[in-house]
Image (spheres, rainbow, N blue to C red):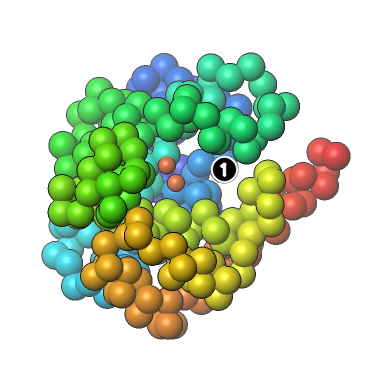
């Protein structure tokens, strides 16, 4: 699979700069692939929303970097044999949003990008983290990321479940839409019904296939 060099280079250069080059490769490439999938969705959604180009670039950059905090946190875990679901659900991994924003601030990224990363798990109804922000109090960049991140996660294989197909993923999001800014979600639905979706499914299919091959090799 063709990895997007700019996501990979960007993430690696930050890790280098923060003295974090010693990351488990699997964690690193999972992070890069997920970042790229979210960035593909963000590009399509921002275009649909007709946002100014420089704003779009900021959100794409934030998409590349939104989960970088997980790499700092996973470094502190004792190994990969822990139940991944358990790890994901701990308060500990919830820190990744703030940790990521701090890492980016340390590297001199703009406040907009740092804030987008800091708040990418806030829900529109105020039930998210880390700030329990709601509605317009959540930065627009973060509200865009939220929709794309959830869809990307649903159509990706997880250690504890297989990827959902795109139609099921969309149904699940419609059923549980309180997390999303409805205006943004409606635009996302237009993207879902556009030709752009093909690029998304192609990337996700390749990514999931690659993960399955790697898992089969190591078992
Ligand atoms: Fe995240
Ligand atoms: Fe994510």
Quarter holding the N terminus is bottom right
Is 149 in front, or is 65? 149
Considering every residue shown, the one lying at the far right of the view is 219
Q: Is residue 135 left or right of residue 25?
A: left
Residue 122, quarter of the rendered image: top left
Instruction: Give the x, y percent position of residue 148.
Output: 39, 59
Residue drawn at x 32%, y 29% as measured from the top left: 98
The answer, for residue 86, to whether it is visible in the render is yes
Ligand 2 is within 8 Å of the C-beta of the residue at disc 1 = no
Q: Which residue is mark 1?
A: 30
Which of the pair 8/103 is nearer the observer?
103
* Direction from residue 133 to residue 205 in the image, left or right: right
Spot occupied by residue 17 in the image (x, y as percentages of width and height): 35, 22
- The correct choice, above or below, for 78 with respect to 124 in the image is above
User: Residue 154 versus residue 106: which sits nearer the camera?
Assistant: 154
Q: Is residue 38 above or below residue 115?
A: below
Rendered residue at 22%/59% (across/down): 56
Residue 116 in sight in this render: no
The residue that appears at 32% across and 69% down in the rendered structure is 185
Residue 142: horizontal and vertical position, in percent? 27, 50
Corner quadrant of residue 132: top left
Q: Report the number of numbered marks.
A: 1
> In what quadrant of the picture does the C terminus appear?
top right
Residue at point 36% right, 34% down? Answer: 97
Q: Position of residue 51 (x, y in %)?
A: 17, 67
């Amino acid at each position: 699979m063709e990895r997007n060099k700019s996501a990979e280079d960007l993430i690696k250069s930050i890790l280098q700069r923060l003295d974090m080059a010693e990351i488990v490769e699997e964690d690193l490439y999972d992070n890069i692939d997920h970042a790229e999938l979210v960035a593909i969705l963000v590009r399509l959604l921002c275009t649909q929303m007709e946002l100014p180009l420089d704003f779009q670039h900021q959100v794409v950059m934030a998409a590349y970097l939104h989960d970088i905090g997980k790499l700092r946190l996973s470094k502190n875990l004792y190994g990969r044999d822990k139940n991944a679901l358990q790890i994901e659900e701990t308060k500990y991994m919830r820190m990744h949003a703030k940790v990521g924003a701090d890492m980016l601030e340390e590297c001199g990224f703009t406040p907009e990008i740092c804030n987008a990363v800091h708040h990418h798990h806030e829900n529109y109804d105020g039930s998210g983290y880390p700030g329990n922000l709601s509605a317009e109090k959540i930065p627009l960049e973060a509200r865009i990321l939220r929709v794309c991140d959830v869809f990307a996660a649903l159509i990706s294989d997880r250690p504890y479940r297989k990827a959902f197909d795109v139609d099921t993923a969309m149904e699940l999001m419609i059923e549980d839409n309180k997390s999303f800014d409805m205006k943004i979600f409606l635009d996302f639905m237009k993207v879902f019904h556009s030709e752009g979706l093909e690029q998304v499914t192609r990337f996700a299919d390749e990514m999931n296939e690659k993960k399955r091959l790697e898992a089969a090799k190591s078992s």
